[in-house]
Amino acid sequence: MSHSVDDELSDADENVHHVWDNSLEPALTVEPGDVVGFECRDALDGQVIPGSGVEDMRDASFDPVHPLTGPVYVEGAEPGDVLAVELLDFEHKGWGFTGFMPGEMGLGLLPEDFPDPGLHIWDLADGVGAFVNGIEVPLDPFPGIIGTAPGDAGEHDTLPPRDTGGNMDVKQMTAGSTVYLPVECPGALFSTADCHAAQGDGEVCVTGIEAPMFVTARFEVRTDMEIEQPQVRSDHPYTPTGRDEPMHGTTGIAPDLMDATKLAVRHMIDHLEAERGLTRGEAYILCSAAVDLKISEVVDAPNWTVTAFVADSLFE
């Protein structure tokens, strides 16, 4: 860890929960300004390991999914305030995975195109994600899940994101960025999880480069801000290498944004298969790890345009 830490939460069972619930006992209570280190398990909670084959992905249980580390009670945070979370540092454990489930489960963007599951175990040791055919994906870790507890009582599923954050999968929430989260209950009850070593905008196959990781964050309570849903300040670039670079884009054009998104990704899979020699399953995984989706146009009714971009540098 490159930052001095005031408190640490390991990934031991007493610091892990699987639902959002504002009645949970805090695992830790901190003061504004404190720096906390979180150890986060992977999104599937150890069901896929470095030696896993595709059957481990196929048989993985989603009940429950997402082991969240926390919750952290931040002194002075009250409903209506904003919890500012400065992300200081991420440290992965040398490996990760990206996979997709059998199509019949209905998960991911294109379950109807992929009846059989797929899995790639990534070696992250050299600071890049090693894929097939010599393809390397630059790493820029972030927490897929970062949020505070909802104000509504009871247990809330971790899969969909909410007004208070959660499973947002915003890849720009990297080290050096600050995430602003609405506070709906006393102490905010912050948790984080589901760290990704890299991800394309869209996370289309349902997983990024899922990786167990250490997260270091500093907390502040903002009473001078009012937000309805999370915001972020980030200098994170949109390209995998962090510079302007050549890329190939495929468009999806349709009267429904989800349909346009599916078309853009299908066309990118076609491109990666034809031009880069990947199988369709490999292409789907690479789209989830490194292809960025952009909403290019939403004003020319009745059709909207979504574009998928892949950087040439991945293949060098």
Image: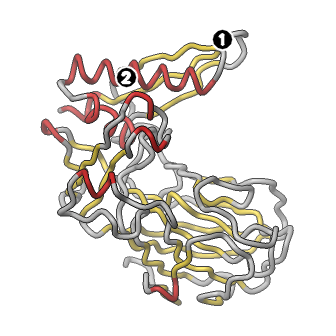
Using a 10 Å C-alpha cutoff, classify the residue at mark 1 as few (fewer than 14 neighbours), some (14 to 19) or many (20 or more). Answer: some
Mark 2 lies on a secondary structure that is helix
- Eyeballing the image, is 210 above or below 269? below
Tell me the amino acid under the disc marked 1. Answer: Asn
Q: Nearer the viewer, residue 142 or 252?
A: 252
List x then y, in percent, for residue 238.
Answer: 46, 38
- Residue 45 lies, with reference to residue 167, above or below; the image says below
Q: Earlier in the sequence, mark 2 or mark 1?
A: 2
Question: Quadrant of the rendered structure where residue 158 is?
Answer: bottom right
- Give above or below for 192 relative to 251: below
Horizontal placement of 118 versus 306: left or right?
Answer: left
Front residue of this view, candidates 214 and 163: 163
Q: Which residue is mark 2?
A: 268
- Farthest left residue in view: 133
Instruction: Mark 2: give few (<14), some (14-19) or many (20+) Cα within 10 Å.
Output: many
Q: Where residue 270 sits in the image (x, y, percent)? A: 32, 19
Give 63 or 276, whichever is nearer the viewer.
63
Q: Is residue 141 visible?
A: yes
In percent of width and height, residue 157 lies at: 64, 62
Q: CA distance from mark 2 to mark 1?
A: 19 Å
Q: Is residue 237 visible?
A: no
